[in-house]
Amino acid sequence: MFSRRTLLTGAAALGGASLLPSLAHAKGSVIAATYPGSWEEAYRTVVTPQLKKAYDVDLELQPLYAVDQIAKVRAARGAPPFDAFVLDPGPRITGIEGGLFKKFDAKKISNAPNLPDGMIDEWGICVGAQVVGIGYNPKKLPKPKGWKDLLSDPWVSRLGITGFQTTFGTVSLIEIAKAFGGSETNVEPAFVELKKVLPKIAAVGNPAAMAGLLQQGQCDITYTNIQTVAILKSRGVDIEFVKPDSGAVAFFTTMHIAKGSADAENAYKYFDTVVSKAVGDVLSKPPHNFIPVNKQVVLPPSLPMTSLDEMSTYIRHDWSKINPLRAAWIEKFNKEMAK
Amino acid sequence: MRRLAEWQLALPLALAFAAIFLAPLLLLVGVSFFNDDKITQPGLAQWAKFYGDPFSYKVIADTMLLGVKTVCATILIGYPLALVYLGASPRLQKVLIFIIVMPLLLSVVVRTFAWIVVLGREGVVNQLLLSLGIVSEPLKLLQTELGLVISLTQIEMPLMLLPLISVMSRLDPNLRDASAALGASRWRTLFTVIVPLSMPGLVAGCLLVFASSTTAFISQTVIGGVRLIYLPLLIWQQSLVVFNWPFAAVVSISLLVSVLTVVSALSWLGRRSGGYVHG
């Protein structure tokens, strides 16, 4: 049937093929979820080559919003489609409550001494901070002072809003509520005030569509995070970021290992690379404008804060109080805003 | 014996359908009968919550109405286009079929974002209207039902045209000549000969456009915005943001049943018209 030669050739080919993947992934790989857009772009161009250089680990990125990551891992029931999460505070709490994370071992992060206290806990590691405020087109509108301005002329007729689906949307609506007498757990004043000006509002959009709506001039002012403004600006959109007079909102972004991950060791190497000085130095500069956690990184003037200590001067929210109320807020937003 | 063999041939497909379609569907129905989002307490609470809220009926009605409006618009534009195709030379037919199929070659996300550029405040349509002096202020087309129906009409058009053209091109051209020879006007020939004979294609097109436009989540939320609330948006919010899967299951089943009801009515109509044509 087979000559000795063909058999040997076949065996060599099979052997060669089995060698190939191990050559390509000498130290293995890690699959990490990342936010679509600015995060994905930054991680692909900066973190991926750095992880390969420092640890010889291949990074595969899966662009997913925080809530999508939680939903996917919950649905996978113990066989997560990726090894590492990147989450905002709300979904982080949902993840902890749902038992989706592996316990975190701080000893495996060589950069740990370079991080401020409290950046690593039993569930994960903080890799950066996000700042939320107002983005507006300075060519079309005067500079707004604060959240109240959004709902008055001339801004309201050019205003684009989003609901409670995202972290930036939720915290902004809370801040609008606070400006009209509400609180972190009482967003009713925001609904009352929004309802009054609803016919004037330029766009009530899906968060994923907001960048497009701003670019096309459908709306010229919205609440958003500083990275979105930075990326739109780098693409030539007329947009400026404003810290509201009552203060901008800040929240930490954290990374976690998915329970059931087969590459936990590589995930630690990935986290260590993300919080390293080398990555922080590049990502903190334009066009990325990420706020790094590594104390050795000198924060460039393009960032809204000069040191991470300033986080305490920003408005923070308690997501353990917000999470249980969010479903009702989303439903209420649907009903109040529906045509 | 031979009949049994044929039946056996269909078995792998039937099993695959059972595994990848029927099983998840049964799971969906099962999940809907739980009261809590942790899926631990069986009960009817989520059904009671959805159907006890008048807002849900409005969303169901709006979703179905969107489908009906898109179907009407695709018929109004698609049917004359199919007639043009029939009357065209074979070379022109090739060009037309390419133009018709082209939207299918683009991702729905790209098509949807292209419509933002077209319908936006500073978009092509508004700039044209402003430069011609027809309007003094830009029209609000994005985030309106009109804008959504316009874009869905283009996005779903191939689904109407392809079955329609496939049925119409099989029509015997002699029938038209016979009708004309017997003294019927062009319009009378159209409505008494061509339209009834093309009914199976028309019904198939309506069916596809209706099912596709009522479930077009991306187009509905990106072009329509979130003030126009349709069932797919509710499903997405409940399953991916709020993580209330039992409630999401109830909304999903409601969407499925509503769409299936209309689709069944349409296919009944299709079968009836088929009988009328051939019987």
Image: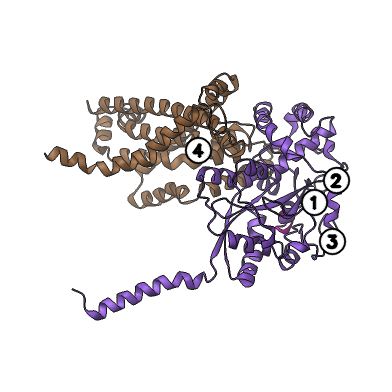
Chain colours: A purple, B brown
Q: Position of residue A9 (x, y in %)?
A: 30, 78
In this view, the residue farthest toward the left is B1
- Nearer to us of marks 2 and 3 is 3
Q: Position of residue B183 (x, y in %)?
A: 28, 27
Q: Which mark is residue B153?
A: 4
- State if disc 1 and disc 2 touch (CB < 8 Å): yes
Q: Which residue is mark 2?
A: A143
- Looking at the image, is A234 positioned above or below residue B5? below
Separation of marks 4 and 3 at Cα, in angstroms? 49 Å
Q: Which residue is mark 1?
A: A240
In depth, the one of A123 and B23 nearer the eye is: A123
Instruction: Locate residue B248: give its quadrant.
Output: top right
**Which quadrant of the rendered structure holds the C terminus of chain A?**
top right
Kindly identify the amino acid type of the residue bearing the numbered disc 3.
Pro
Q: Which residues are magenta?
A: A232-237
- Looking at the image, is A338 positioned above or below residue A20? above
Kindly identify the amino acid type of the residue bearing the numbered disc 2.
Lys
